[in-house]
Amino acid sequence: MTGALGLGASLIAGTGSEAAAAEPAEQNPAAAMERALFEPAAGRPTSLSDLADGLATAHGLFSGARYAALGGALPPLIATAEATRDAATGRTRERAQAAVARAYVLATELAVKQHSEAAWATADRALIAARASGDPRPLSDAARVLAITMRRAGRSSAAVDFLACTATSLVAEKGGPQADTLAARVCLLMTAAYTAASGGRRSTALDLLQEAEETAGRIPVEQSGKPVGLFTVTASPAEVSMYRISSLTVLGTPRRRRPVRPQCRSHAVG
């Protein structure tokens, strides 16, 4: 396995399939990833394009709810990303840090789905790597999964404050309304709104949703016609509407807004 780490997505797909076949259905899908936190797999550097392919494939496993396969794929993916980062310098190192952050974001998503306490460790590692990358997109994703972990531990109020503070810092650091920064801010605001709603903070949730909606409307659309996206969430008015519906449902408010057709479904809400 270690010798094949440079193969990117092909490694992830193969490892995941083998893991899914080898593990009993009742086994914890996050078990291999949890062990790897304390007994890291050996890794060796690879190219950033291979890392991107591996992350895309792993994200596909998560989106398809193939959690056993994802759990088996994450340890070598994380090891490869960290080895690539450790061997890099300058801008290449920053981009590798973003890959490390995204691998740990997926690890946190899996841990949350499995109600594993490992989510605290993986979210922390994701946030550290994201901050080192200097990129608002992985920072937003990392902050989001940490806030979800906090919310599910009954710390909704602290999670809302953390998300709002991070959103403000993105604007302060980047200054201009760059698309990536705006998209990252929308992600944070949507998550903060739902988190506030889950904690019964109605006015805060509605204010955050309004701000998220206004910010999403300022994001330019790509030439393909798709809105700017982060790793796990699309920053668009349709996505904000999905969060609004979820938030109002949690608050117990009737859904009376006009219906929209969501352009994607994220795994953040709930």
Image (cartoon, rainbow, N blue to C red):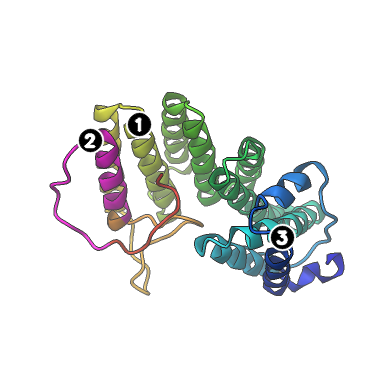
Q: Tell me which segment is drawn in magenta.
A: 239-261
Residue drawn at x 42%, y 55% as measured from the top left = 266
User: Which mark is first along the chain, 3 or 2?
Assistant: 3
Depth check, mark 2 against mark 1: the one in front is 2
Q: Amino acid at mark 1?
A: Ala
As drawn, the label of residue 252 is 2
Residue 112 higher or lower than 75, as above or below: above
Q: Secondary structure at mark 3?
A: loop
Quadrant holding the N terminus: bottom right
Q: Which residue is mark 3?
A: 23
Residue drawn at x 29%, y 61% as measured from the top left = 262
Residue 104 higher or lower than 48, as above or below: above
Depth check, mark 2 against mark 3: the one in front is 3
As drawn, the label of residue 196 is 1
* Left or right position of 193 against 49: left
Q: Position of residue 215 (x, y in %)?
A: 30, 47
* Near-viewer residue (27 or 78): 27
CA–CA distance in space, label 2 to label 3: 41 Å
Q: Amino acid at mark 2?
A: Gly
